[in-house]
Amino acid sequence: MNPSFFHQRRDSGQGHSDIKINYVTWDGSRWSAVFTDNGTAFYHTREGASSGHKDTIMNYKTWNGENWTARVAGPNKFLHTKQGAPSGHHDEILNYVTWDGSHWTARVGGGFPSGFPTTPGAYPPSFPASGIFPSGGYPPSGGYPPSGGYPPSGGYPSSGYPSGGYPGSGFSTGLSSFHHSRQGAPSGHSDTIINYRTWDGSNWTARIENGRFYHTRQGASTGHHDDILNYKTWDGSNWTLRLVGLDKFSHTRQGAPSGHEDVIMNYVTWDGSNWTARRT
């Protein structure tokens, strides 16, 4: 199980949980990270990118503009090291700059595994001692794509979808919800559905039920189970999605003999806007 983050804005009074952190890295570019590998590493995606990479570190800018590296150091802890410093310091918080330049504090939000090593070091004086940080609200969300409510269930197309189904060996039903983030937004929204456009441009809703997708066409009255989801990605190309394990997707471009695995899905929703989905 991968933990989440709890975010608090500087000099405010509320907080917000989210599976990701939107941070500014050393060169000033904007990135998102989620925990992966049971909370022992991060998966980083650059703003606007269709895929990312896994790493054990996060290079971020802190409140005074300095460059720091964070590593997972134990239950609910990070190891922070200033750029060029030989050692660092453990703390339960991470003070970072988010995409709009505002100052935030992140903590591990729960579900963290135990049994991690510790390394002593000198924590930067620019960071106040843990426990005295002002709280705040999470960056405003772009909201879930407008859907007009959950559409009535409908019939899944009977043609135009590759056959074969999902492989049986090693199959896991996974989890049943998604976390959605609009392209460029600092935060997102969790839901049990995904509203997407399929290859012919029509609008559909998918849920995960017993390890398979249940697809309903917008405005229809019945639905259909399938092992695949055919969707349009941000550049308008057609792709097929399958579930892999507990937190991954398998993506195959229309007509391609093979594809790739990723923890994200970049899709087009009903109003034509670009969104990213992760399994939660």
Image (cartoon, rainbow, N blue to C red):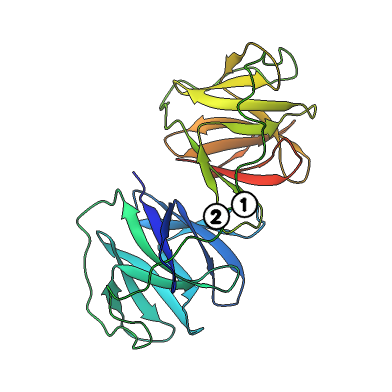
Mark number displayed over residue 123: none
Query: In the displayed structure, does residue 267 sit left or right of residue 141?
Result: right
Give the quarter of the image for residue 52.
bottom right
Residue at image position (19%, 56%) is 115
Q: Which residue matches tag 2?
A: 187
Q: Amino acid at mark 2?
A: Ser
Res 201 seen here: yes
Q: Give 208 or 116, whichever is nearer the viewer.
A: 208
Instruction: Please determine whether, in this image, residue 208 is positioned above or below residue 47.
Output: above
Q: Is residue 257 visible?
A: no
Residue 97: % across, % down: 51, 73
> What residue is disc 1 on?
142
N-terminal of the pair, mark 1 or mark 2, is 1
Quarter of image, res 6:
bottom left
Going 70% across and 20% down the picture, which residue do you hit? 161
Observer-nearest residue: 25 or 136? 136
* Image marks 1 and 2: residues in contact by CB distance under 8 Å: yes
Residue type of the residue flagged with mark 1: Gly
